[in-house]
Amino acid sequence: MFRLDGKVALVTGASGGIGREIARALHAQGAVVVLSGTRQAVLEEVAASIGAEGGADRLHVCPADLSDAAAADALVASAEEKAGAPLAILVNNAGLTRDTLAIRMKDEDWNRVLDVDLAAPFRLCRAALKGMLRRRAGRIVNIASVVGVTGNAGQANYAAAKAGMIGMGKSLAQEAGSRGVTVNTVVPGFVQTAMTDVLPDAHKEKLVGSIPLGRMGQASDIAPAVVYLASDEAGWVTGATIHVNGGMAMV
Amino acid sequence: MSEIADKVKKIVVEHLGVDESKVTPDASFIDDLGADSLDTVELVMAFEEAFSVEIPEDAAEKITTVKDAIDYIEKQKAA
């Protein structure tokens, strides 16, 4: 089950904690994986690490700065060129945070997060859908965040972008459904990554206390949900929001 | 038949997978040729690309038949 042999998958933010595990998991199922991110050297390291277990020829690196609209628009085409085949799976995982309380939040903090975390995924979806609709096949998996559903002090920008991503995904799912193309959202809870390492320890302890399963998530807890949604077996699942959060928010 | 009309017809046949004989000027994309709303958007985008024209949303909404498409593109090209 859940094999992805020969399918081309593009994973953005593949240099980050969750992104690299998603790339690893898709690759392990047989996919041809194009890793995107801003740092070429880190992407190459990730590719080398995944490829060390075999299948290095199914890994490609395609750097892009998603705060640049033109770069986001061009990424699907360049990924297809690198992989030498049309895109079957798009995983919008890239995201960044600029945390601060709203009264101190600058326009620049707001705009940068909305650009990278919401506008860029839309641009990638739009580019990917054109081909997927024509081919009558395709899987889009967007990676949101629990704070897009629950809100979080200090993250008005990030929460707005991630909530927007969930609504966008549901709309695209309705647009693309008649062509067998699915669009779903995976909503991770608090996962141990560089993004959450910066949280104060006391805050982290409090967070863990609110998680019924009693621990922060690992990137490897998230990736299998993406594999499932990318698979043929998930062909009747679209517009869904899959929460992977240790029970922190049962929505 | 004009070159534009030929090309429009070809795009419609290709995109909707219908028989060429069905693509008459009066044929409605949705009622006669089995298109859904997504097909009509894709058709408009295909016309835009093939003829290097821009078809704004309000004009696109009025293009419901093969003749509508041909007339609109001919007018744009003549302008």
Image (spheres, coloured by chain):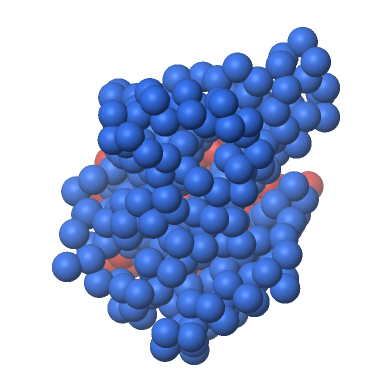
Q: Is residue B41 above or below residue A22?
A: above
Q: Residue at x 48, y 29 (%)?
A: A205
Q: Where is residue A160 drawn, in percent x and y?
A: 58, 24
Per the rendering, the colour in which chain A appears is blue
Is B76 positioned to the left or the right of A83 in the image? right
Q: Residue at x 22, y 54 (%)?
A: A234
Return the residue nearer the eye: A27 or A154.
Answer: A154
The red chain is B
Is A179 positioned to the left or the right of A65 in the image? left
Q: Residue at x 39, y 25 (%)?
A: A209
Q: Is residue A87 above or below residue A55?
A: above
Return the residue nearer the eye: B3 or A112.
Answer: A112
The quadrant holding residue A155 is top right
Q: Where is residue A72 drawn, in percent x and y?
A: 67, 54
Return the residue nearer the eye: A136 or A91.
Answer: A91
Residue that sits furthest to the top in the current view: A103
Quarter that holds the N terminus of chain A: bottom left
Q: Does any portion of residue A228 appear in the rendered image?
A: yes
Q: Does any portion of residue B67 appear in the rendered image?
A: no
The quadrant holding residue A251 is top left
Q: Where is residue B18 drawn, in percent x and y?
A: 29, 63
How many numbered marks are there?
0
Q: Where is residue B56 drawn, in percent x and y?
A: 64, 37
Q: Residue at x 77, y 50 (%)?
A: A68
